[in-house]
Image (tube, grey):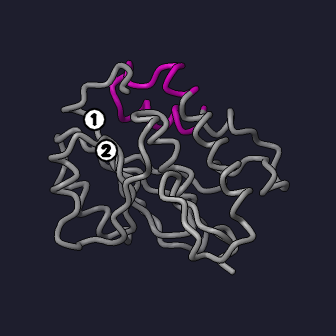
Amino acid sequence: MLYNIDMQRIKLITVTVPRTASTLVSNINTGLLEPECKILFASKLPEADPLRGFIESNRLTLKIHAEPDAVKQLCREYIDTGVVFVYVNRTNYLKVEESFSNLVVLEYDDLLYRSKHYHDNSQTIDHVLQYVTNEYNKVLPSDTITDENIAHAKHRALDMDQRYDVIKHLPFSCYDNYYHVHGSHRNRS
């Protein structure tokens, strides 16, 4: 189900290195644009060009892992196509420092929120969603994200946390493909 979004115009691709809150960002994106869908994940680029099939599909969100140089190349290649890339910068990880009209760069520390799994932060999921929305509004058309979209994203992020709570003590091989979370996801043990 879509809300105020021209399907032929906007597609969000979370493209970042692992361990940078990419699963949270992917769930926020999917919650914003296609709340009933599972996470669509292509493990690495360039594997038989997973973007081409995605762009030609009806899906609006995708998660892929790629290094900053690949992200910059993708931004150049897909400029003015309605494809917007989302990258997360994190301390001690490779960063994207350049700016592109089709790139949103989020800061990892601004994505952390207090939950059952992360107690060292006073930020709420509402603060995180406000931050993400503010950053997206710098790139997306002004009417793209509505309060209803944000409510769907919040619901999805909280449901992802609940699902993780169920499987967190299981091995990493235990996988939920709807939210793209694994057992031991956060500590990889």
- Residue in view at x 31 percent, y 25 percent: 5
Secondary structure of the residue carrying tag 2 is: strand
> SS class of the residue under badge 1?
loop
Quadrant containing the N terminus is top left
Observer-side mark, 2 or 1, equals 1
* Position in image of residue 94 (x %, y %): 48, 72
Disc 1: which residue: 10
Q: Residues within 10 Å of mark 1 (few under 14, many from 20)?
A: some
Question: The magenta stretch spans which residues?
Answer: 130-151
In the foreground, 119 or 182: 182
The residue identified by callout 2 is 84
Identify the residue at horizontal 66%, vertical 52% (top origin).
163
- On screen, residue 175 versus residue 117, left or right, reads left
Percent coordinates x, y for residue 47 in the rendering: 23, 73
In the image, taking residue 80 as reference, residue 187 lies left or right, namely right
Residue at x-position 24% and y-position 30%: 7
Q: Amino acid at mark 2?
A: Val
Does the segment drawn in magenta span residue 76?
no
Seen from the viewer's position, the closer of residues 37 and 112 is 37
Q: Residues within 10 Å of mark 2 (few under 14, many from 20)?
A: many
**Which three-letter amino acid code belongs to the residue tagged 1?**
Ile
**Residue 181: where, in percent of width, then height?**
57, 61
Residue 70, placed above or below residue 152: below
